[in-house]
Image (tube, rainbow, N blue to C red):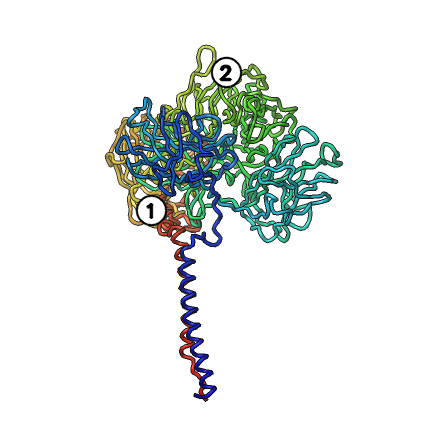
Amino acid sequence: MSTNYKSNYVRKKKIKAFSKKASLFLLIFTLILSLIPVSPILAAEDAELLDNGGFEEGKAPWINYRDADTSVTDQEAHSGNNSLHVFDRQSTVDGPQQVITGKVKAGGTYEFSAKVKYTEGPDQKGFNFNIQNGPSWENIDVMESATINKGEWGTIEGTYTVPEDADLSQTFVFIETEYANPADPETDLMDFYVDDASFVDITPNPNILENSSFEEGQEPWTNYGNSTVTVTDQEFNSGANSLLISERQTTTTGPKQDLTGKLEAGKTYEFSARVKYNEGPDQKSFNYNIQNGPTWEYIEVMETATVNKGEWGTIEGSYTIPEDADLTESFIFIETSYADPGDPVNDLMDFYVDDVTFGETLRTAPEDEEPGEIYDGTEAVGKTPGNNNPLMSHKFGADPNAMAYDGRVYVYLTNDEYEYDAEGNVVDNTYAGINTVTVISSDDMVNWTDHGPIPAAGPEGAAPWATNSWAVAVTHKEINGEDKFFLYFSNNGSGIGVLTADSPLGPWKDPIGKPLINGSTPGTEGVVWIFDPAVLVDDDGEGYLYYGGGVPGGGSPSQEQAEHPQTARVIKLSDDMVHTEGEAQLIDSPFHFESSGIHKHDGKYYYSYSTNFSGSRTGDDPGYADISYMTSDNPMGPFTYEGVALRNGSQFFGVGGNNHQDFFNFNGQTYVAYHAQTLGKALDTVQGYRSPHINKVEYDENGKIIDIIADMKGVEQLANLNPYQRTEAETIGWNAGIATQESEAPGSLLESLNLHVTDINDGNWVAVSQADFGENGAKTFEANVASEVGGTIEIRLDSKDGEVIGTLEVAPTGGEQEWVLMETDVTNVTGTHDVYFTFTGEGEDNLFNFDYWKFTEVAGGDETPGDGDETPGDGDETPGDGDETPGDGDETPGDGDESPGDGDETPGDGDETPGDGDETPGDGDETPGDGDETPGDGDETPGDGDETPGDGDETPGDKDSDKDKELPSTATNLFNYLMVGMILVGIGGVIAFYARKRKVNVE
């Protein structure tokens, strides 16, 4: 054998041996990797908040809740060697407890689970996994319940989001059996075991700031202006460090972090920072600022907060980057309120910052999702036939404020809309993106007309300087002989703005271009949240504004701070209602939290408010989030505490949350408007989405408010509906599966403002309550509709399955904004009935849009014109014949027939009653062509707003369809690593293949 051949042969054998070993090594390595439980790349690190959840380290820190005894045992275990034995229980609430105070945060989302087993008692038993936020049992939430089989380990699991307004001064979790009182020792108070208890923080973290808690040193934080910034362990809000800002030369100096390249125009970001100072004045205002652009002229104060000396305070809010922002340079910084020159003691003190965040808000709907679309079905939810609360069920609305004007009640609402995570799941309401105000109105208190949103704040709002528009107060006043309307809104908790209009529906404008009330308003010092206004125009025309809320002391207020927060104020308004006069006066409302309200009854002024969640209660103290009230003989006070007027919604509806009220008078009767999560409960989304209710208010002989009983029944209908005048389709008593949207067809109350009913699919319906058809009855029915698809309107009496009195075939009109008035005959119907419009059709797309409707009345028997017969519908068409009755068919303008709905559709004829359909050509004019009724005549392009339901997957409940197809995270990990392993094995195989194929040079 030649030397070359022998050398090549040996080399070939070595390569083969190496290839086999490499392949075997790669296979073993891959299998090992696939068994390692590693989280996916880029997944957030979940933080377990419970200690010793498997009870392998003894009992601590678990303790007994109430009267139970607990001990670690090895007689039963789901995993490991031990579990916790719960015994000698005296009531069903007794069980194991662990304190997690300081570990959870408002708005945070947590995943929890526990294994439970019992061996004696009934065959099945319900167990609850609970959390208590605050010192009182009234703040207990049952996060999840599970039915456990005797002798088997069962699981209680779910997710929970801490409410934004939760009292986190004391927080703990515990496990109990389902409530029973009296409790049976054998079937309710049996021993049980708990194992593998877990409570994990899964809150998404959108924060784009680096080193927010300064635990990793100072970088990348720098100083803005002339100051020194250093990391210190002398003060901290969390962790072990904070950032100290010292040697400040001006008030604008503070900590800064560059965000260039990280921001996007038009997007909304949430931010927060904790701030503390120990020397200087008792209180100091701090600003959280942003600069987009190269010079200081681009600085915007995103939020201001008043901080108490020696306490950690919070600056927080949300901010939308303007569409035209210069993003070539962007950074955030924190400063004290501006003063020039700055006083060394009162303005230029050292301060600390910690836990600074700035991140994209989660308040975004998935692509193609229409915000506000909440339900698609054929049965009523929330507001059901026979009940008049909540006022509406096709959308949410909170913080109701009611104004009676010209025979109607207008209710203005914080525009709660569903918020979604990236997967399309509904998440808790953060309120961060709310910048519009919903308006509804009614003349009978049961059928409510949806007037849509008022764009109040944000880039497209009347007040673009403001970020939010929460909890408004609206009033009217005669100025220079004309009625003027004033809307006061909360820019989150940082201040109050004002808008004005010439009608209750707008259009609205900002008369001053800045906050009316903020931290610099005289007398506002010490107000934690500058929000929740209430307005009163007294009998003498003088105006007063009430506002303020919050509890001082941060997350751990003292009992005195809880009982007397002293954060409510009243200030006099100027004659023009858009400026203030003098200094705000303190209202010392016990346990005050939010929701100022004011009304007058029998010469007394009633100030109402919602109580806080802090401190303990004794005797006649109000509960948590109750509506309490005070009285005075002067609108500026002082006010005397009277008691509770309305308990929290949990007492009436089985679902609680915050509370907000407004007392108002209509037709000589006092009512209270308030909100509750009743619609959310019906939709299984009790996540801070609220709905408006109204109930009557009565007083005793001493002027005290008799305890108000909130209910779903609501108030009685005050007047019948007239079916012979134009009625908006969005005037709704009850409904199923529809939505409303802004329309291009002219409106009735206000020409420039109109909505229509949309998202109409087979089986959906809308209904009105108590339409009075009179003695003659109806003859025909007409509806203004627009459609690309087409369908049918079935007109039914008294229920969605009731007698059909007519059917209107809706043919396609050429577009969803191509409006055509269509008519059909109806079976004669007399008397008073609920009327249901049931929709039928094929396909998943929107069948048609529905603007308004009207019946025509059966004519009388006397058809001779000019005979002096004054009966409506007698066929007397001659103008000026003295027949002044509405609906008489007298169509000539100026004939003196001034009644609304009289069929006189010509503009300018003197018929001035709003809502009678006589405001704009085309809105009630039945002559084809003169009211822009012809499709394709230049009306708006259909589909340009992407209004077709079904194209954005609008059906609630279907958002998880893709999610249901996802693998669990552990399976995903295994799959990922098996894939990596297969690739590595493939590489090894390739090496072996080429080694075997390699030709040996024997030459």
Q: Nearest the camera: 47 or 78?
A: 78
Q: Are marks 1 and 2 in contact (CB under 8 Å)?
A: no
As drawn, the label of residue 861 is none
Q: Residue at x 67, y 32 (%)?
A: 278
**Residue 808: quadrant of the picture:** top left
The answer, for residue 403, to whether it is visible in the render is: no
Classify 10 Å Cα crowding around label 2: few (below 14), some (14-19), many (20 and above): some
682 left or right of 500 in image: left
Residue 452 in the image: state x and y as whole percent: 45, 38
Classify mark 1: helix, strand or loop: loop
Residue 550 in the image: state x and y as whole percent: 55, 29
As drawn, the label of residue 642 is 2
Outermost top residue? 701
Q: Nearest the camera: 182 or 485?
A: 182
Q: Residue at x 62, y 22 (%)?
A: 585
Type of residue at label 2?
Glu
Q: Nearest the camera: 341 or 166?
A: 166
Residue 689 in the image: state x and y as whole percent: 43, 35
Q: Residue at x 45, y 53 (%)?
A: 40
Classify 10 Å Cα crowding around label 1: few (below 14), some (14-19), many (20 and above): many
Residue position for label 1: 847
1 vs 2, front mark: 2
The answer, for residue 827, to whether it is visible in the render is: yes
Type of residue at label 1?
Leu
Q: Nearest the camera: 315 or 712?
A: 315
Whole-Å distance between the Cαs marked 1 and 2?
55 Å
Figure quadrant of the N terminus: bottom left
Mark toward the start of the polypeptide (1 vs 2): 2
Residue 659 in the image: state x and y as whole percent: 47, 28
559 left or right of 188 in image: right
Classify mark 2: helix, strand or loop: strand
Image position of 287 with respect to 610: above or below = below
